[in-house]
């Protein structure tokens, strides 16, 4: 049959579009650090649950409230990290607010004689904020 075009079979692997705009390194590190904070706070929350179950408490509602606050922090940090990994621009501001909350926490740790923990917490908060407002992250989230 003259004039027919042979059918080309794609084989077992079909064509895949390659993402031309990968996630920038600054955003990737911000997500990693947020998730790392969630894991660390999760360990603190697990210890609080254990303490709630085994300690003799004088104020059980307060102990449970502190534990619930820690668990909510774990959920918030993990959810914000996931949203930023998916390039959801609305997650940047709450993530920055949570990071800025590390500044007074670190300051009071320093005042209380726990500078070995307060200074790194403050540096972590400022570092993640810097990653979240850096130009590559801003472009990736669609703010420019």
Image: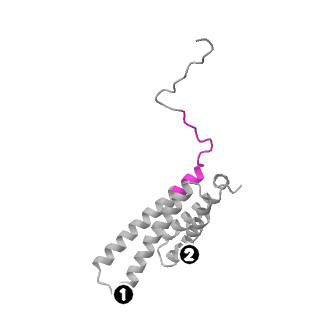
Judge left or right: residue 38 versus residue 139.
left
**Image quarter of residue 8:** top right
Left or right placement of residue 10 versus residue 136 in this view: left
User: Could you tell me residue 73's position as x and y percent?
Assistant: 47, 70
Q: Secondary structure at mark 1?
A: loop
Point 33% across, 88% down: residue: 58
Is residue 24 positioned above or below 51 on the image?
A: above
Packing grade of label 2 (10 A; few <14, some 14-19, many >=20) is few
Q: Residue at x 56, y 72 (%)?
A: 101
Magenta segment, which residues? 15-31
Residue 108 location in percent, x, y? Answer: 52, 77
**Occupied quadrant, residue 2:** top right
Q: Residues within 10 Å of mark 1 (few under 14, many from 20)?
A: few
Identify which residue is drawn at 51% across, 24% down.
9
Q: How many marks?
A: 2
Q: Is residue 32 above or below residue 93?
A: above
Look at the image and say whether residue 22 sits in the magenta stretch: yes
Q: Is residue 12 left or right of residue 85?
A: left
55 to 119, vertically: above or below: below
Which callout, 2 or 1, points at the residue further toward the start of the chain?
1
Q: Residues under labels 2 and 1: Cα distance?
A: 26 Å
In the depicted structure, whether residue 38 falls above or below residue 52: above
Which quarter of the image is occupied by the N terminus? top right
Tell whether position 29 is magenta: yes
Residue situated in front as seen by the camera: 42 or 130: 42
Front tag of 2 and 1? 1
The percent position of residue 111, horizontal first and vertical second, equals 52, 78
- The residue tagged 2 is 104
The residue wearing badge 1 is 59
């Amino acid at each position: 049959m003259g004039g027919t075009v042979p059918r080309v079979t794609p084989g077992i692997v079909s064509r895949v579009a390659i993402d031309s705009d990968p996630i920038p390194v600054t955003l990737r590190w911000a997500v990693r650090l947020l998730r790392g904070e969630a894991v660390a706070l999760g360990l603190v929350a697990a210890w609080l649950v254990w303490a709630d179950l085994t300690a003799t408490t004088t104020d059980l509602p307060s102990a449970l409230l502190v534990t619930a606050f820690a668990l909510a922090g774990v959920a918030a940090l993990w959810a914000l990290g996931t949203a930023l990994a998916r390039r959801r621009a609305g997650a940047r501001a709450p993530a920055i607010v949570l990071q800025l909350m590390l500044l007074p926490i670190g300051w009071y740790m320093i005042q209380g004689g726990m500078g070995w923990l307060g200074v790194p917490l403050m540096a972590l908060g400022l570092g993640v904020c810097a990653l979240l407002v850096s130009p590559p992250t801003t472009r990736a989230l669609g703010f420019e």
